[in-house]
Amino acid sequence: MRSSSLVVLACLLLSLAACQEAPPTFMVIVATETPDDNNNATATDIVITETAAPTVTPDPPTPAASPTPDPFPTATIGQIQVAEQPFERGRMFWVQPKRQIWVMEITEEGRAIWTINNDPLEKGQPECDPELTPPADNLYQPERGFGKLWRENPEVREALGWAITPDEFGYISRYEYHPGGTINENGEYVMGPGYHILFSLYEEAFRFNEADRTWQLGRGE
């Protein structure tokens, strides 16, 4: 009977150990014989020892690789002040940030040419030439910086003709610059010609190409 009780006790101890919320342990049962008064082995003592579960150290997480930055520069987008005046065969834009006059002409072959000129008008200089008379009532002499460039540069005057509005008009335009260039075999950016986007007063988009100094109506993308 004693042996049966001890076995039941051992089972209960094993069951209690399995119900603990702590990390599981390994139960090792060591049985030894105990002789009775007649030197006969009639019972068994149960000795229970606990062996801790082996500790598992997780591998450290592998750090995520940092993304490689794109070396190609992004577009410059903003708002700038401009002035615009249409002509018989082209247009002029005054670009305030650099005080430049962009001349847009259309050649006899139909090619759209873009040239850049510094604003020639200085403070105190005359804004127009009263001796110049347009050939028709619906044509006008440009004034201020446009007029000085037009009067002093025969090529510009011949290319554009007369203005078709009595004056230039200024406004704030959306402006974009898209850089050109390439990425070499070392992953480095190599600068190249890009293009500008400028909008007219009536929200027409004009694209100015640095590669061949041409312009076109629309973004051309």
Image (cartoon, rainbow, N blue to C red):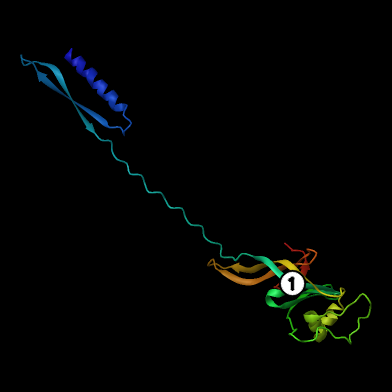
Tell me which amino acid carries mark 1.
Answer: Val
Vertically, is 212 above or below 31?
below
Residue 54: horizontal and vertical position, in percent? 28, 38
Could you tell me which secondary element the residue under label 1 belongs to?
Answer: strand
- Can residue 98 be seen in the rendering of this structure? yes
Residue 20: horizontal and vertical position, in percent? 31, 29
The N terminus is located in which quarter? top left
**Quadrant position of residue 118:** bottom right
Residue under the point 29% across and 23% down = 15
Residue under the point 94% across and 76% down = 137
Q: Is residue 96 left or right of residue 48?
A: right
Q: Residue furthest left?
A: 38
Which residue is label 1 attached to?
Answer: 82
Of 127 and 220, the residue lying toward us: 127
Q: Residues within 10 Å of mark 1 (few under 14, many from 20)?
A: many
Residue 201: horizontal and vertical position, in percent? 79, 66
Q: Residue furthest right?
A: 136
Q: Residue furthest front?
A: 124
Of 202 and 64, the residue lying toward us: 202
